[in-house]
Image (cartoon, rainbow, N blue to C red):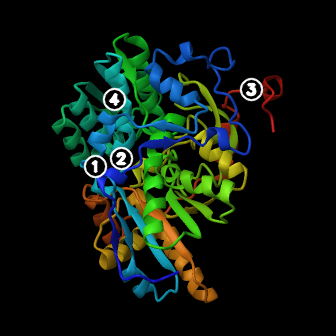
Amino acid sequence: MVDKLHTKYVLAETDMPRAWYNILPDLPRPLSPVLHPGTKKPVTPDDLAPLFPMALIAQEMSQERYIEIPDPVRRVYAQWRPSPLYRARQLEKALDTPARIYYKYEGVSPVGSHKPNTAVAQLFYNQQEGVKRVATETGAGQWGSSLAMAGAFFGIAIEVFMVKVSYHQKPFRRSMMQAYGATVHASPTNLTEAGRSILAKDPDTPGSLGIAISEAVEVAAKNNDVKYSLGSVLNHVLLHQTIVGEEALLQMAQADDYPDVVIGCAGGGSNMAGLIIPFVRERLSNGHRTRFLAAEPTACPSMTRGVYAYDFGDTVGMTPLVKMHTLGHDFVPPGIHAGGLRYHGMAPLMSLLHEEGIVEAKAYHQNSIFEAAVLFARHEGHIPAPESAHAIRAAIDEALEAKAAGEERVILFNLSGHGHFDMLSYDRYFEGDLEDYDYPVEAVADAQTRMPQVDEAALGVGD
């Protein structure tokens, strides 16, 4: 490939992709059906209607390959999209590697992460159906702040249940949500039956995304004027994020290059899926041999240590059952600083790609990822979110492997958000106070005993 002297490739607004790509009809095999938590039968649109507007339910189940992005959504996107693709030349030089490293930078959004790509879309469809209030959960706060911003744009009140440990670790994310007009609670709370039941068992619990989801779903289920919104995991969420990968494909073409490996941090799966899914399409249809690598924390390793099974998306067991890589729905992770990756399960779509051998997964300790984050910041300038630093760690390791092998390797990763509200985490790292934690294998086995039992053979979906 021609090595052009450029560091940034910007597409004009008119070049912004006009459709999201839906990979469901192109998967090697269909996703297992989503099941009703009570009957354990495949859900119908009517089953999901108390939680989501019908337009999003249709997208969740759609077999259309391309779904047009509505003009009002594109107009909001145009405030920061297309996001830039950078060549990490200074990092390459520091590593003395023959690898070429690119990163798609989603930190240019108003809230500093990739999450508005789906928050804006979801609240547009809610507004179209007359919804006035939406409840949600958030971990580190990127999702909560994104939905709060979108709520301000579309005139929808937002109630956020923020995982308690992150509520205290990341107070400025909470302030950002409040600046956009959202109401924010430290989860678990005494406001819901789910929260009260958890607090009764463990008053000092740090909380978890599963618990926060239970609280938000309960608010939506018990109030006819409230819908629920999720920032990752579900098909329609990953669909909206594919604008990242579609842009990256065009930008890599402008760079006269193509990735050998595409990397993303992985918690629920949305930012990684958004980047890789269009490249997976190219691998499946055009014979590209690109590898896809999910980088996750050792403290919450759903893909590397979890089981591929039906489980609830929340702790209490209110959500539908989905087949995914899971550590068990009652998993409460340690308080690592990558709060957005502290979820017990992985998106069903990403889980299937992992099962099919298309997506690889590696787990990293938090001291290792902060080391990579600092190295990246000192050479590229951007201070990454702890979540995104997992992808940086994986990219650096790939570049060093290329150096050891004496081979060229083109690496693309998603820098899914900046770390400007995570500096207390960096302080802890500089002070040597971060603990590396490995989630024990026996804990997964124990959690399996409490997972819902599903007769997959009877459903015709067993492996």
Residue 375 position within the rendered picture, expressed as x and y whole percent measured from the top left: 37, 77
Q: Label 3: which residue?
A: 454
Q: Label 2: which residue?
A: 140
Label 3 vs 1, first from the N-terminus: 1
Label 4 vs 2, first from the N-terminus: 4
- The tally of labels here is 4
Label 2 vs 1, first from the N-terminus: 2
Q: Label 4: which residue?
A: 123
Badge 2 vs badge 1, beta-carbon distance below 8 Å = yes
Q: Distance between the residues labelled 4 and 1?
A: 25 Å
What's under tag 3, amino acid-wise? Answer: Val
Front tag of 4 and 1: 4
Label 4 vs 3, first from the N-terminus: 4
The secondary element bearing badge 4 is classed as: helix
Q: Label 1: which residue?
A: 170
Res. 183 visible in picture:
no
The answer to whether 233 appears left or right of 454 in the picture is left
Circle 4 residues within 10 Å: few <14, some 14–19, many ≥20: many
Label 4 vs 1, first from the N-terminus: 4
Q: Distance between the residues labelled 4 and 3?
A: 33 Å
Label 3 vs 2, first from the N-terminus: 2
